[in-house]
Amino acid sequence: MAYIGNQVSSITTAAQVTNTTTNTENKSVFLAFVDTQGTTTTLETDSDLAYNPSTNLLTTTGNVNASHLNATTTLQSDVVNAVTGTFTGNVTASHFVGTATQAIYADLAENYQADDTYEPGTVLVFGGSAEVTATNKTHDTRVAGVVSTNPAYLMNKDSGNTSLGLTGRLPCLVKGPVDKGTLLVTSATPGVAQALNDAYYKPGCVIGKSMNTITNSSVELIEIAVGRF
């Protein structure tokens, strides 16, 4: 049952109560609550809790407490407290505190200001006219990360123009030959990784490990595990 507006009225005796279905009108209606105090039963509404039949939008200015929250359209509230929640779309908040247990994508990234536009998979180092750039120096210890495609978590999202994968699994431009597990460093080809040459190793030059095999000297976009090894 719902009331249009927030009207107050009294019913002494009612032999029949008629409930009218309305699901197309674009207006706010207020839910009716039954309050029984002794022998007196009253219907009450709350102007802070409204429902629009045409948009299927339930709006509250107060708190929402639930053991499980299942939202398939739109939920608008100042505060939502729930033990569990199921959402079929995106959840947007100016500030979110929670514990993430799973992510669709695989790398942790941070935004940096690059001196040019670089494609995903490009290896960048600290330097250049901005914060990061490409290099043609092999085993460069300035290596910063790999331009990310879809990071699982992005830090400093409102600063910089390039998302660099700092750790995790992501595509990278690699010059072969490499095997699975090969340590990767920068190469003489800007933005491309290559296998580590032990004779040129310096602390800080490794960008990650190959997760695929390239049998020849071609440059391919393969998945690597980024990290400081």
Image (cartoon, rainbow, N blue to C red):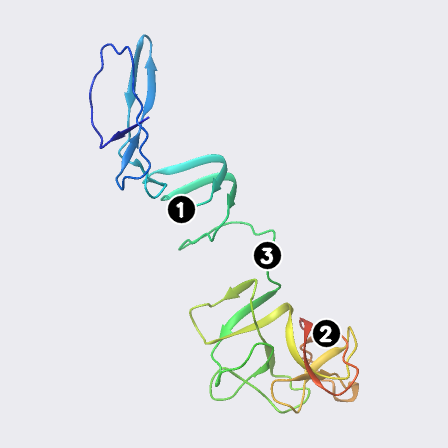
Report the residue marked by disc 2. 209
**Tag 3 near tag 2, CB within 8 Å:** no
| Residue 6 as seen in the image, left or right of residue 138 | left
Looking at the figure, which quarter contains the N terminus? top left
Residue 103 in which image quadrant: bottom right
Report the residue marked by disc 3. 103
Looking at the figure, which quarter contains the C terminus? bottom right
Query: Mark 1 against mark 3, which lies toward the viewer?
Result: 1
Relative to the observer, which residue lies in front, 126 or 32?
32
* Residue 83 to residue 204: above or below: above
Q: Secondary structure at mark 3?
A: loop
Report the residue marked by disc 1. 74
* Residue 144 to residue 67: above or below: below
Relative to the observer, which residue lies in front, 30 or 192?
30
Query: Mark 3 against mark 2, which lies toward the viewer?
Result: 3
Amino acid of disc 3: Ala
Q: Secondary structure at mark 2?
A: strand
**Tag 2 near tag 1, CB within 8 Å:** no
